[in-house]
Image: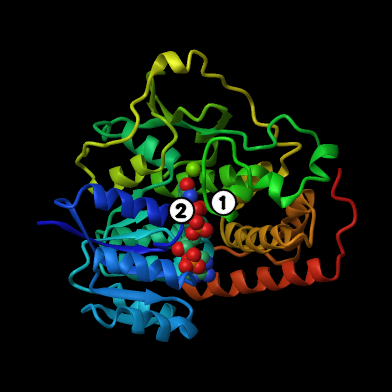
């Protein structure tokens, strides 16, 4: 039996690579559902090639275009987030790949897990915002959450066969992004174009900016906390510019397991989709002699304040990660649109964390409210340019 997959965010960097993985293993996988937000042309092309049963376009105004193009095929076409959420109970879905950008993943992932569907999760923001609730829903419904993020896939792989052995700590590796080693004076003037040039990975714009601010590693610490049930002090970050070791686990006896390979997201995507099986791959094999030096250094979390901020937020818990995530999404968008500078991103987030009061035990409605409040606070702050001196 082929595994029937739903890809949420099929037109993005992860989504398109997931389709490459599926195309390379036609005996193992089939595409049951494709969801994209606005890229109707690519969604139509993908749907024509992979012939899913259901196709959903997020933007309702694009429904006619997609529906007309796919009418010669026997594909059901819907539009809007509500339709996607409703489809998460389809009996014909064996697995959901959450590969959309940002907070938008929260509701469909929750619904998939409520219906007992295993979720391969690239969309880290969902775990950052509501990791407590998401992991509870997954446990109650016996639905697996399989990491796709390369660091978390590495840790997951290191943990295979170690069920009885407690983790002493995990070591998340970070490339350091395009501005590794730069100071605040340099960062004060960087443009979105400079920030979008990641040294090792080709990814969507939002995560690429998060990598440049080191917020991505901050989000990944919180993601790891929920995926592996860790305390904040068990999560360490180390800069490893070559991105060959994807992350490590240290056990009680001091032994450290690392997972290595070339930086290629198809590998962790394939591992999550095929788990527990390892499938053959057609990509370049790793050659140690081409990487005679693997180096490691401490992250500069004084210059890259998003990382230290995310650690504090992880420790605070409750609604703090949700507020931080929403403010970060607004701030990154404003930076990409040249409304604020690179160093103003953490200033916007800090403002929202200060402005919105802390709260603990949260329902899905609460998360939605705090997300809204934080976005409004961030937008208001940016519009009124209350930002004074980002260089501290
Ligand atoms: P992209 O920006 O390349 O793709 C985003 C996808 O989400 C697109 O299909 C897009 O649709 C859809 N989308 C965008 N906005 C919305 C919205 N408001 N509602 C619903 N769908 C939306 O992102 P990536 O593929 O790079 O990243 C996706 C997720 O995976 C992120 O959470 C990221 O952090 C995570 N991730 C990515 C990695 C990577 O290598 N790229 C590595 C590890 C994690 P459309 O284009 O049609 O508008
Ligand atoms: Mg990652």
Instruction: Report the front residue among 110 and 99.
Output: 99
Left-right relation of 357 to 161: right
Q: 168 and 279: which one is in front?
A: 279
Is residue 116 something one can see in this rendering?
A: no
Q: Does residue 7 appear anywhere in the picture?
A: yes
Q: Position of residue 20 (x, y in %)?
A: 32, 50
Q: Which mark is residue 13?
A: 2
Q: In this rendering, which labeled residue sits more in front, label 1 or label 2?
A: 2
Instruction: Tell me which residue sits at (45%, 41%) in the image.
Output: 230
> Is residue 302 shown above or below 27?
above
* Separation of marks 1 and 2 at Cα, in angstroms: 10 Å
Asked if the residue under mark 2 is in contact with the one under mark 1, i.e. CB atoms within 8 Å, the reply is yes
Q: Position of residue 60 (x, y in %)?
A: 46, 84
Q: Is residue 122 left or right of residue 20?
A: right
- Cβ of disc 2 within 8 Å of ligand 1? yes
Look at mark 1 in the image and give the residue it sits on.
Answer: 207
Image quadrant in which the C terminus is located: top right
């Amino acid at each position: 039996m082929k595994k029937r997959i739903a890809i949420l965010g099929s037109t993005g960097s992860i989504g398109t690579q997931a389709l490459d993985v599926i195309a390379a293993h036609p005996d193992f996988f089939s595409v049951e559902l494709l969801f994209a937000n606005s890229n109707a042309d690519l969604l139509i092309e993908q749907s024509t090639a992979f012939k899913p049963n259901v196709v959903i376009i997020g933007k309702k105004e694009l429904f006619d275009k997609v529906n007309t193009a796919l009418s010669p095929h026997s594909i059901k076409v819907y539009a809007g987030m509500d339709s996607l959420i409703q489809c998460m109970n389809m009996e014909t879905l064996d697995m959901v790949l959450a590969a959309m950008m940002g907070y938008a993943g929260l509701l469909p992932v929750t619904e998939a897990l409520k219906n007992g569907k295993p979720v391969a999760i690239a969309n880290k923001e969902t775990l950052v915002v509501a990791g407590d609730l998401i992991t509870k829903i997954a446990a109650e419904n016996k639905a697996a959450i399989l990491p796709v993020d390369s660091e978390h896939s590495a840790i997951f792989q290191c943990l295979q066969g170690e069920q009885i052995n407690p983790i002493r700590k995990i070591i998340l590796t970070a490339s350091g992004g395009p501005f590794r080693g730069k100071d605040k004076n340099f960062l004060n003037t960087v443009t979105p174009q400079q920030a979008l040039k990641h040294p090792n990975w080709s990814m969507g714009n939002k995560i690429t900016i998060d990598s440049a601010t080191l917020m991505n590693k901050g989000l990944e610490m919180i993601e790891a906390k929920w995926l592996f049930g860790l305390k904040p002090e068990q999560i360490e970050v180390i800069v490893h510019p070559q991105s060959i070791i994807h992350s490590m686990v240290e056990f009680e006896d001091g032994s450290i397991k690392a997972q290595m390979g070339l930086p290629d997201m198809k590998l962790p995507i394939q591992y999550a989709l095929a788990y527990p099986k390892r499938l053959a791959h057609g990509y370049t094999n790793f050659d140690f002699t081409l990487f005679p030096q693997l180096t490691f250094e401490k992250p500069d979390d004084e210059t890259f304040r998003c990382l230290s901020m995310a650690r504090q937020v992880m420790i605070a818990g409750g609604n703090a990660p949700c507020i931080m995530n929403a403010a970060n999404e607004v701030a990154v968008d404003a930076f990409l649109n040249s409304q604020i500078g690179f160093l103003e991103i953490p200033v916007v987030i800090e403002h929202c964390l200060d402005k919105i009061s802390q709260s603990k035990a949260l329902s899905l409605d609460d998360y939605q409210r705090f997300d809204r409040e934080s976005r409004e606070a961030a937008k208001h702050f940016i519009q009124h340019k209350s930002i004074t001196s980002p260089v501290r």
